[in-house]
Amino acid sequence: MTYKTYEKYINIDNHFFELMPLDWNIYKLKYITSSLESGKRKDFDDTTYAFSLGGEHINWEGTLNLTNNRYISEDFYNSMNKGKIQENDVLLVKDGATIGKTAFVDNLVQKMAVNEHVFIVRHNNIVLPKLLYYLISSHIGFTQIKLTETGSAQGGISQDILDKVDFIIPSNLTLQKQMVNFLDTKVTKIDATIAKNKELIDLLEEKRVALINQLVTKGLNPDVPMKDSGVDIIGNIPKNNKIVRLKFLCNIKTGDKDTVNRNPDGKYPFYVRSPIVERIDTYSFDGEAVLMARDGVGAGKVFHYATGKFDYHQRVYNFHNFKHVVPKFIYYYMSSLFSIEIEKGSAKSTVDSVRLPMLEDFLICYPPINEQKQVIAYLDNETLKIDSIISKVKENIKLLDEYKTSLIHHVVTGKIDVRGEEI
C-alpha cells in the first residue's frame, strides 16, 4: 500500500533525522516527559494488594503478561515514593537481556508498581501518552535507547536516555491524535493476524506430536492385535511390541565442555542445549546420536544427528550405542512421549532440568527393527509436510512483524502523512 507524504519538509542537523515535516519540532526525551522513574522490590507478600511488575511481565509486542503473579503489601506500596503505575504510563525494561521491551498501560484494573528493573516513562502536555509509547517502542526509539546501554553481558540503561534520545513530533495535538488512531487501528489488525498465525502453528505442532505419538506406539497397521501396555501415556500397543527402560536400549552421557573457544569457521558442530549449534575445531564423538537439552528453557528438546564428528556441552545428553532400536525411532519417540512428560512436569525439577536417573528409567515401547524403519520413513515424509507449512506460517509472521515495525517507523518519523487515510 502506498501512503502520501507531507507537503513540505525541512532539513535538520541530527544523527538520526535528516528531514522533518514543516510544523514539527525535534525534542530530547526529557522535554516530552514529566518523569522517568523506577521502583524497588521487596520480599513478595501473600496478600494481593498491589502487583509487583518486572521485565518478565512485559511482552515484546507491547502488552502485559500478568500470569506470574507477584504482590507487595499495602504498607510497602504506600511507602513507595516512586514506581507506582498510573493509567497511560509507558513501561520500559531498563536492564538485563530484554532492555528496550516496552508496554503501554491503557487499562489499569488493579494497583501496580514496577520493580527496580523497569522504568515508568510519563508524558507531559507536549505529547499524547500513546504517541509517546509509539515513539519509544519504534525502531528509531529502540535503536537510540540501546545505544545508551552500558555494562557487560547484563548491561543497563539509565537516566541518560533523557538527554541522549531525540524524537520529532508534530506540534498539533489533533495530528498527534490522528497518528495514534491510525497506528492503533493498523497495529490491532496486524496483531490479530499474527495471533491467528500463531494459533495455526500451535495446532500444527499439536498435530505433529499426536501423529508421532500414534505411530511410535501403535504402528502403521490399525488392524494388528493389541495389548494393554500398563503405561497411561502409552495405552494399548501391538502385541509384538516390547516395553523397555531407555538405559537398556542405548548409552547416555553428557559432554565434558562447559566453555569452549568458539570459531565460526570451525570444522565440527558444537551442540549447546541442543539443537543450538556453533562451530569449533575439536570433537569428542564420531557417529550417529540423539541429543537432548538437559536444562534451561528447552529442557527435553531432542535433535537427531545422523553421522559425523561433533562435540557437545555438558548440559546436553548424548544417546548412542543403540541396541534393538534405530536411533531416529528413539528421536521420534522422545520428541513426542517425553515431551508429554515434560508438559506434565514430572520429568524435570524446579530448575527446569532433566535428571539422568529419570531419563534412564523412561519407558520405551518399540516394535521390531523393520517396523521401526517403516514408521520412520512415514514420519519423515509426513512431518516434512507439516514442518514446511509451519515454516511458511512463521515466515508470514516475520513479514507481518517487519511491516508493523516499518509502518510505525514511517508514521512517527513523518515519512508518511496519515491525515485523511482510511482506517
Image (cartoon, helix red, strand yellow):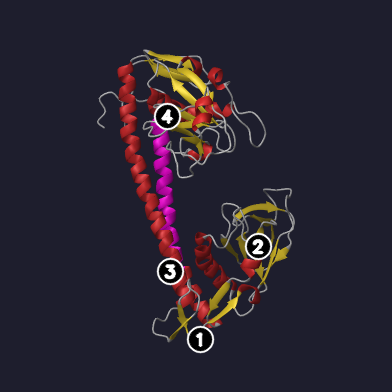
Tell me the CA gap for discs 1 and 4. 62 Å
**Considering only vertical position in the picture, is 88 above or below 397?**
above
Q: Amino acid at mark 4?
A: His
Q: Earlier in the sequence, mark 4 or mark 3?
A: 3
Residue 244, given in percent of the width and then of the height, sits at 59, 78
- Name the secondary structure under disc 1: loop
Q: What residue is shown at x 74% (from left), y 48% (from top)?
A: 261
Residue 415, given in percent of the width and then of the height, sits at 38, 24
Tell me the CA gap for discs 2 and 3. 25 Å
* Closer to the eye: label 1 or 4: 1
Name the residue carrying label 4.
409
Q: What residue is shown at x 53% (from left), y 61% (from top)?
A: 342
Name the residue carrying label 1.
240
Q: Amino acid at mark 1?
A: Asn
Q: Amino acid at mark 3?
A: Leu
Stretch in magenta:
381-408
Q: Earlier in the sequence, mark 4 or mark 2?
A: 2
Residue 173, given in percent of the width and then of the height, sits at 33, 17
* Front in this rendered view, residue 240 or 282: 240
Image quarter (top left, top right, bottom left or bottom right) of the N terminus:
top left
Image quarter (top left, top right, bottom left or bottom right) of the C terminus:
top left
Tell me the CA gap for discs 4 and 2. 44 Å
Name the residue carrying label 2.
317
Q: Earlier in the sequence, mark 3 or mark 1?
A: 3
Name the residue carrying label 3.
211
Tell me the CA gap for discs 3 and 1. 21 Å
